[in-house]
Image (cartoon, rainbow, N blue to C red):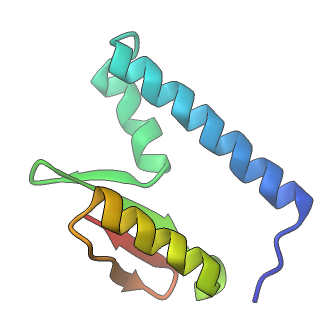
C-alpha cells in the first residue's frame, strides 16, 4: 500500500483548506457559479440531476481500513448511506 509522506499530508491539507475557502466564498456569494465550477470539478464535486456527488480518488486503487471507515462515516452522515465503487481508483458518494 502507498505510504503517504509528510509532503503528501501537507499537500492534501493545503488543497482541502484552499477548497474550503473557495466553497465559503461561493456560499457567501463572492464567487459566482461559473467561476466556482472548475474549482468544484477539480476537487471531485459533481452535480447529477440536481444531486451532488463526491468522487474520491484512491491512489493505486488501494485503501486502508481506516480510510474506508472514514468514507463509510461520511456516507452515513451526509449521503444515502451508500458508497459506489466507480473504478479501481475512485469511489463515489451520491
What x and y, as percent, mark residue 13? 71, 46
Q: In front: 25, or 64?
A: 64
Percent of width and height locating residue 23: 44, 30
Residue 14 placement, left or right of 66: right
Residue 84 lies, with reference to residue 30, above or below; the image says below
Q: Is residue 89 above or below residue 75?
A: below
Residue found at the far right of this picture: 6
Residue 82 sits above or below residue 43 on the image: below
Percent x, y for residue 43?
49, 49
Residue at the (72%, 41%) spot, across then down: 14
**Which image quadrant is residue 9 in?**
bottom right
Is there any visible trace of residue 63 in the rendered image? no
Please report the residue visible at 77 percent of the width from the left and 49 percent of the height from the top: 11
- On screen, residue 26 versus residue 67, left or right, reads left
Q: Position of residue 56 (x, y in %)?
A: 48, 66
Can residue 71 be seen here? The reply is: yes
Q: Quadrant of the C terminus?
A: bottom left
Amino acid at each position: 500500500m502507498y505510504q503517504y509522506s509528510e509532503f503528501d499530508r501537507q499537500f492534501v491539507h493545503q488543497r482541502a483548506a484552499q477548497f474550503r475557502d473557495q466553497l465559503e466564498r461561493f456560499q457567501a456569494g463572492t464567487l459566482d457559479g461559473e467561476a466556482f465550477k472548475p474549482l468544484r470539478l477539480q476537487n471531485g464535486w459533481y452535480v447529477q440531476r440536481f444531486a451532488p456527488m463526491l468522487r474520491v480518488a484512491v491512489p493505486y486503487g488501494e485503501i486502508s481500513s481506516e480510510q474506508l471507515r472514514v468514507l463509510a462515516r461520511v456516507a452515513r452522515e451526509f449521503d444515502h448511506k451508500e458508497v459506489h465503487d466507480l473504478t479501481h481508483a475512485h469511489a463515489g458518494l451520491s
